[in-house]
């Protein structure tokens, strides 16, 4: 049997119903995973890694700046070691129903969240054209007390937040339908400057928290040791950008 990593971000739950990978079809319970697979969810991320400074190209919110490329580098080496040498990869990390991390999108307490995410439907392909059947449930990551998504893997920028990171965004055009998500693009919703300065004593203490989180991820083989300091450096750039523009 092939060995497979399923990797998804927040957008895939809102825009591609990624929860169907690991839940029962009725959406009521977590489904068991095949032993030759792992599932990794990148909390608070859009379809592609974010960049700094973020853009607002036709979107209502700034694009998501969460850069998870260092995580994917580590996962790629873990997959290679699993295939070549039989070294067990890091355990799957994804939002689960039984931990309250994955909920029906209708139950999400987030007034800014989409009312009309992309849905998946049962299809009957016995005829041409295919016949659409019942809609699948849509489950999305719950929001934690700090305003970011629960479950899965939080990059240090999300675990030590300066913003709320979302997998959805909206089209900015005045004639665009309201609360329908934009394709593939997420959102960065910065915290207020006063909230940031109240939460963290300053730039250096913030970066030390980021460094601790990055080292924890490296110990879990979710970051390469060589990427720890670049991740910290990038977090410093986020701090500088956000506090200079907020």
Image: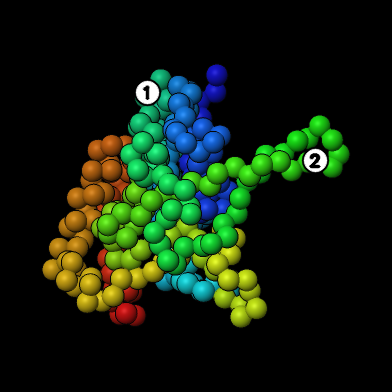
Say whether residue 5 is visible: no
Residue found 32% across the figure and 79% down from its top? 246
Q: Are marks 2 and 1 in contact (CB under 8 Å)?
A: no
Return the residue at label 1.
Answer: 87
Residue found 84% across the figure and 42% down from its top? 129
**Dot 1 lies on which element?**
loop
Query: Whole-percent x and y of residue 91?
Result: 35, 31
* Residue 229 appears left or right of 37: left
Query: Whole-percent x and y of residue 172?
Result: 57, 76
Return the residue at label 2.
Answer: 130
Image quadrant in which you'd find residue 124? top right
Image quadrant in which you'd find residue 239? bottom left
Q: Residue 113, relative to residue 134: is it above or below?
A: below
Q: How many numbered marks are there?
A: 2
* Residue 226 appears left or right of 176: left
Q: Residue 84, relative to residue 160: is it above or below?
A: above
Label 2 – label 1 distance at C-alpha: 43 Å
């Amino acid at each position: 049997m092939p060995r497979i990593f399923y990797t998804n971000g927040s957008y895939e739950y809102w825009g591609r119903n990624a929860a169907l990978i690991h839940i029962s079809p009725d959406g009521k319970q977590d489904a068991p995973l095949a032993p030759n697979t792992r599932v990794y969810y990148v909390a608070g991320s859009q379809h592609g890694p974010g960049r700094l400074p973020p853009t607002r190209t036709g979107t209502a919110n700034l694009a998501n700046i969460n850069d998870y490329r260092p995580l994917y580098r580590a996962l790629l080496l873990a997959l290679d070691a699993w295939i070549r040498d039989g070294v067990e990869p890091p355990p799957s990390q994804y939002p689960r129903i039984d931990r309250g991390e994955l909920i029906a999108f209708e139950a999400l307490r987030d007034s800014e969240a989409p009312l009309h995410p992309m849905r998946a439907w049962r299809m009957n392909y016995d005829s041409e054209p295919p016949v659409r059947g019942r809609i699948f449930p849509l489950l999305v990551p719950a929001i934690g007390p700090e305003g970011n998504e629960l479950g899965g893997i939080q990059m240090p920028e999300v675990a030590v937040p300066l913003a709320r990171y979302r997998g959805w965004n909206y089209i900015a055009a005045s004639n665009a339908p309201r609360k329908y998500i934009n394709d593939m693009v997420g959102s960065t919703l910065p915290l207020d400057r006063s909230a940031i300065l109240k939460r963290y004593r300053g730039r250096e203490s913030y970066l030390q928290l980021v460094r601790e989180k990055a080292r924890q991820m490296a110990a879990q083989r979710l970051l390469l040791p060589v990427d720890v300091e670049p991740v910290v450096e990038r977090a410093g750039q986020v701090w500088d950008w956000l506090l200079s523009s907020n």
